[in-house]
Image: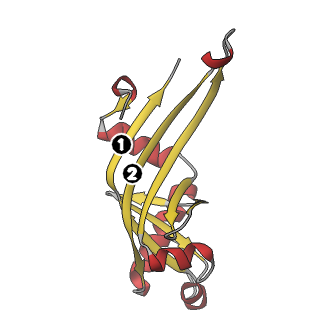
Amino acid sequence: MRRRDKELRDKDVIEKILDKANVCRLGLFDGVKPYIVPMSYGYKSGTLYFHSAQDGRKVEILKKNPVVCFEIDIPGSVVSSEEACSWSMNYLSVMGEGKVSFVSDENKKKEALNCIMDHYSGKKEWSFSTGMLQKTLVFTVEAENMSAKESSS
């Protein structure tokens, strides 16, 4: 990280950002072009949880290249200035890398989906029909090289 003065190292602060943010931008690479997709997520103990349709561009790329990067942020306010290039933005962000693992076990799928639902609803236990579980792709990313940053002017 170039700006060490903005780096956040406290694990509890990083976890709060991950708990509070709403969108994870997942960066993929198909061997030719990068592809980024905003996704709903859940987070627990170093693992990000995602759900998806069974097919599509994202899934095709992940099956060929499971190595990803991610960015999660809590946007703040724009900081204006009298000088054009002196404007800034207040925010909190977490970035990292990892490798996708697809979840096929029904009980593990339920755990992952409950984690995602808990992130947005605060409710820890949900019911999932067998049909819904069969048509939903669930995958995880073990977060590696995670770093966090705070910009406040």
Q: Which residue is mark 2?
A: 96
Give the class, few, some or many, for how many residues have Cα within 10 Å of label 2's Cα (few <14, many ≥20): some
Q: Which residue is mark 1?
A: 147
Q: Position of residue 45 (x, y in %)?
A: 32, 57
Quarter where residue 148 is shown: top left
Q: Is residue 76 visible?
A: yes
Looking at the picture, tell me which residue is in the foreground, 70 or 43.
Answer: 70
Give the class, few, some or many, for how many residues have Cα within 10 Å of label 1's Cα (few <14, many ≥20): some
Residue at 53% x, 42% y: name it: 73
The three-letter amino acid code for the residue at tag 2 is: Gly
Residue at 37% x, 37% y: name it: 13
Q: How far apart, in angstroms, are the residues tagged by discs 2 and 1? A: 6 Å
* Label 2 close to label 1 by CB (< 8 Å): yes
Q: Farthest residue toward the front? A: 32
Compare marks 2 and 1 and give the one earlier in the sequence: 2
Relative to 152, say whether 49 is above or below: below
The secondary structure type at the circle numbered 2 is: strand
Q: Which mark is residue 59?
A: none
Relative to 88, say whether 136 is above or below: below
Q: Position of residue 52 (x, y in %)?
A: 58, 74
